[in-house]
Structure formats: structure tokens, C-alpha cells
Image (spheres, rainbow, N blue to C red):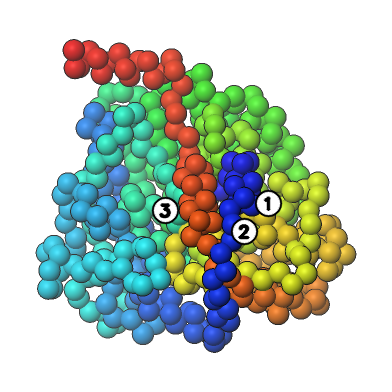
């Protein structure tokens, strides 16, 4: 995800309060794995089902199944689905292996939030004691309440808001699942669809329908989808360096020509540095006029200005994957270091301490926005420790060659770096990411404000917006 440019200036101006919190990381990765098993409880292999979008009603009818096994030592399944947690669905049923689970109550569903995260969990009042695959099915009606008739992913990884806003899942980067989703549009207005993975238009004539298949297990918050009215949009596709690239934009909005100018040299550069484009079905782009961008698996919803940053995330964040949200500082750091600070970057200051990883629990959502600058400084220090920028590019290529789709933690990154280079920065990593102060609340709220602004800019260009104002006026004279 890319922030607007004024962001750093704001952080620098905010006074830092001293809040001691030098908890060092207790225990090994195995303990953290056990903790994550206890918190997330299920291991999803597939998320499958249908999302039927009704533009006239601004609502979606979903029927989604999770195919899962219990994680080691766990018996009581749970899932994340925020509209259900908030009570904002207008109807739903839940079934486990075909058996209905009746509402919230003693033997039905239980809502809770653990200390250390804002992510609510919904527990199912049944125990599973075997190691077999099970099926959790949720049928629901999700109101969108949008002034403009779109249905699209709207992930913000700084906040840690993922697709648990749209379908039941587990919201953490390290829980990977294949997504096989069917998107339908009700009514006669023609729509366009782009999204992650293999997208195919179905031959059905009674309604508009597309299937999306990620074809492999990916983090749920990296699944992109976008349905927009065909008449309001323009669409182009090209093959660049062997990678199919699709761009959809609002008519009269962002410049697709400018996007091609960015992308055409960029994909070959990334392939030469880090390896073949990691997604076999290529790249789908929903191009918006202003703001930053958000990366997805084989896709991005982005402004032209953020495109190169988001496309770099195809390598770092969408195929080399952080184990937890708090570890995902390094996909921003790698991307900022390679893309945004390519011309010059400082090494991390001597004696630098931060708790940008361990100020959060391993199951907290979102990441520390010091990732962008201080994280990039850490990457620059790593580069200088092994001979400079080209050497670190080789290390990043080695990560891409050996560690894709196997989520790993911050300290595992230090281990991989030592294995590659012989340089052990583990104790530096502990200082840089697991010591030091918690940012002041003022600093945190500055970061929150930036994260809010990083939300995709869905402003609809005037000629398009005027049409909807006119039709609303006709409906409500
Ligand atoms: Zn980013």
C-alpha cells in the first residue's frame, strides 16, 4: 500500500512521548506458531461460493463455504466476518457440515474479541475432534449502502481491514486459502469485472456472471475483485514482457496511457531483478485518479502515481508473504527501499531502537507505519552490510526463488539473510524491531489519519457522477 507524500512530514512534526516498553521477544517461533494456532484455530484450504450483487438494492447475497481442518490442538472452530460481528447483515444462516447453527446463543455462535487485537472472532458452538476436512457455510445478505453502484474489494492493510468485510474468512496474512468465487450481477445494466487470478466470464444469459479462481492458496485480504458499470468505464489490455495486463478505469478519470508508460518498462525491470512475474494470470489494475493504492494477488487498485509501488508488491507482500500483519512491515520496507527511495537512502541510525513489530501482538491487525521509512533504512543497512544495492537485490531475488507462499516472520527474514550472505543481523533486528518505545498516541493518530487517506479514492469523475445525480433526481423529484 502506498501513502500520500505528506505523511512523513506529519510524523516528524509530532512530538514523541517516552513510553518504555522494551519487552524482548519471549520464546521461539514455535511458541508463536502455537499462539497463532490457538487464536485462529482453523486451517482453511478453500473459500468457495457465490456473491450475487444487486446494484438496484446496493446489496450482495452471499453463499460462501470454507473448507477447513482444525489446527493442531484445536477443537472449537471460529471465523472472521465483520458485518456479522457488527450485526449489519440483513439476514444470515450458518451451517457446519450441513447442520444449521442457530444464531448467537449458548450452542450457536459466540462473538468475542481477544485482548491484543481489534479483530472480532465468531466461534461456532460445536467441537471438532478429528483431523478431517469440514465445511462451514454462511448464507447472507450484505447491504453495501454506497451512493455509486460498485462492488469491489476495499482492503486497507495499515488498518488491517481485509475481505472479512465481504465474506467469512480468517483475516491474517499467514492463513492461505484457494479462493473460488463466482460473482453475479442482477439486473440489465452491463458490468465489467476484473480481479485476482483466473477470471472467466460465464456463458449464462439469464444474468451476468464471472468466476474468479486464485488457483492456489493466497491470503484472503489479497484477493481483489471489482465490478463497475460498463458504460462508466474504459478497459484496455496488453501483453508486457509475457505478462498479460488488464486496466479498467472510470471514463474521464485516470489516464490509462500514463499507466502503460509506467508499466511497460517496469515489468521487465522487476523480472530482471527479482524473477518471473509471480502470478501466472498476470496483472489486473483498477486505475483510480487520485490517492495511493492497495496491492492484491495479481492485481491492484491504484492511482498512476502509486502503480510502480503496488506492482513491486506482487513480489513482496503478495507472493513473498509475511506470517502476521505485524511482520508485514518488511514488504513495505522492501518496496519503499526498491521503488520510492531508489535514488538515495540512509542507513538506519546507530543505536536505533524501535518496537515496530513487538508493540503489537502477533494476531493484531495492521502494521506499524514506521515500516515505510525506518523499515527502508533497515533494508539500506542490510544492503551496505553485504556490499550495496545490487547485493541486496540478489538477496531479494533469492527470497523470491525460495520462499514464496511460505509466510515467514521478521526474525526468519534475518535468518534467511544470514543463510544467503553469512552476515548475522539477528541481534540488530531485535534492536530495530523488538525494542524501543511505543509511538505516542499523537503519533499513532497521525498514522491513523494517513491510513484513512490511503483508502482508495473512489471519487467518480464528474460526467459519470452527473448521470447518477440525474437519475436519482428522476427517482426522487
Ligand atoms: Zn505498499
From the top left corner, tell me how far across and down residue 436 is, in percent.
61, 73
Residue 465, numbered label: none
Closer mark to the observer between disc 2 and disc 1: 2
From the top left corner, tell me how far across and down residue 240 is, in percent.
68, 36
Q: Is residue 417 above or below residue 288?
A: below
Closer mark to the observer between disc 1 and disc 3: 1
Asked if the residue at tag 1 contacts the one at tag 2, i.e. Cβ–Cβ closer than 8 Å, the answer is yes
Residue at (49% x, 80% y) in the render = 32
| For residue 216, side relative to residue 2 (left or right) | left
Q: Is residue 364 above or below residue 253?
A: below
The residue carrying mark 3 is 162
The residue carrying mark 2 is 371
Some atom of ligand 1 lies within 8 Å of the CB belonging to the residue at label 1: yes
Q: Secondary structure at mark 3?
A: loop
| For residue 14, side relative to residue 266 (left or right) | left
Q: Nearer the viewer, residue 291 or 76?
A: 291
Q: Label 3: few (<14), some or many (≥20) within 10 Å?
A: many
Residue at (76% x, 78% y) in the render = 424
Task: Compute the Cα span from label 1 to label 3.
Answer: 22 Å
The residue carrying mark 1 is 336
Q: Secondary structure at mark 1?
A: helix
Can residue 226 be seen from the camera position used here?
Answer: yes
From the top left corner, tell me how far across and down residue 43 is, in percent.
39, 71
Can residue 202 be seen from the camera position used here?
Answer: no
Residue at (43% x, 15% y) in the render = 463
| For residue 232, side relative to residue 320 (left or right) | left
Q: Nearer the viewer, residue 147 or 237?
A: 147
Closer mark to the observer between disc 3 and disc 2: 2
Amino acid at each position: 500500500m502506498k501513502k500520500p507524500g505528506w505523511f512523513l512530514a506529519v510524523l516528524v512534526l509530532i512530538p514523541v512521548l517516552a513510553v518504555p516498553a522494551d519487552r524482548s521477544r519471549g520464546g521461539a517461533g514455535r511458541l508463536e506458531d502455537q499462539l497463532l494456532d490457538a487464536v485462529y484455530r482453523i486451517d482453511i484450504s478453500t473459500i468457495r461460493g457465490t456473491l450475487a450483487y444487486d446494484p438496484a438494492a446496493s446489496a450482495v447475497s452471499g453463499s460462501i463455504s470454507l473448507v477447513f481442518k482444525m489446527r493442531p490442538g484445536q477443537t472449537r472452530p471460529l471465523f472472521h466476518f465483520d458485518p456479522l460481528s457488527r450485526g449489519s447483515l440483513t439476514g444470515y444462516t450458518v451451517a457446519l457440515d450441513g447442520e444449521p447453527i442457530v444464531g448467537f446463543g449458548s450452542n450457536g455462535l459466540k462473538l468475542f474479541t481477544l485482548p491484543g487485537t481489534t479483530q472480532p472472532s465468531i466461534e461456532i458452538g460445536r467441537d471438532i475432534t478429528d483431523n478431517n476436512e469440514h465445511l462451514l457455510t454462511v448464507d447472507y445478505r450484505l447491504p453495501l449502502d454506497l451512493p455509486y453502484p460498485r462492488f469491489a474489494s476495499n482492503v486497507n492493510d495499515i488498518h488491517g481491514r481485509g475481505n472479512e468485510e465481504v465474506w467469512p474468512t480468517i483475516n491474517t496474512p499467514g492463513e492461505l486459502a484457494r479462493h473460488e468465487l463466482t460473482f453475479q450481477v442482477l439486473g440489465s445494466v452491463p458490468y465489467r469485472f476484473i480481479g485476482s487470478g483466473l477470471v472467466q466470464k460465464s456463458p449464462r444469459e439469464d444474468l451476468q456472471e464471472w468466476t474468479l479462481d486464485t488457483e492456489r492458496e493466497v491470503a484472503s485480504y489479497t484477493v481483489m475483485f471489482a465490478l463497475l458499470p460498463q458504460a462508466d468505464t474504459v478497459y484496455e489490455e496488453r501483453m508486457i514482457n509475457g505478462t498479460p495486463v488488464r486496466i479498467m478505469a472510470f471514463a474521464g478519470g485516470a489516464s490509462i496511457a500514463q499507466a502503460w508508460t509506467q508499466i511497460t518498462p517496469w515489468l521487465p525491470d522487476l523480472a530482471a531483478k527479482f524473477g518471473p512475474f509471480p502470478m501466472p494470470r498476470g496483472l489486473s489494475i483498477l486505475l483510480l485518479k487520485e490517492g495511493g493504492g492497495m496491492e492484491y494477488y495479481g492485481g491492484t487498485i491504484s492511482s498512476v502515481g502509486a502503480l510502480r509501488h503496488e506492482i513491486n508488491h506482487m513480489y513482496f507482500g503478495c507472493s513473498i508473504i509475511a506470517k502476521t500483519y505485524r511482520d508485514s512491515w518488511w514488504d513495505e520496507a522492501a518496496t519503499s527501499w526498491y521503488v520510492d527511495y531508489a535514488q538515495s537512502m540512509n542507513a538506519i541510525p546507530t543505536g536505533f531502537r524501535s518496537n515496530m513489530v513487538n508493540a503489537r501482538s502477533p494476531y493484531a491487525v495492521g502494521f506499524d507505519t514506521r515500516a515505510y521509512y525506518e523499515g527502508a533504512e533497515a533494508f539500506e543497512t542490510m544492503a551496505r552490510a553485504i556490499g550495496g544495492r545490487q547485493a541486496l537485490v540478489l538477496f531479494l531475488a533469492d527470497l523470491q526463488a525460495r520462499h514464496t507462499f511460505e509466510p515467514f516472520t521478521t526474525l526468519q527474514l534475518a535468518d534467511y539473510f544470514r543463510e544467503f550472505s553469512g552476515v548475522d543481523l539477528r541481534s540488530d533486528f531485535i534492536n530495530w524491531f523488538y525494542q524501543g518505545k511505543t509511538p505516542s498516541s499523537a503519533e499513532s493518530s497521525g498514522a491513523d489519519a494517513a491510513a484513512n487517506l490511503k483508502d482508495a479514492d473512489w471519487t467518480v469523475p464528474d460526467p459519470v457522477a452527473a448521470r447518477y445525480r440525474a437519475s436519482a433526481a428522476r427517482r426522487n423529484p
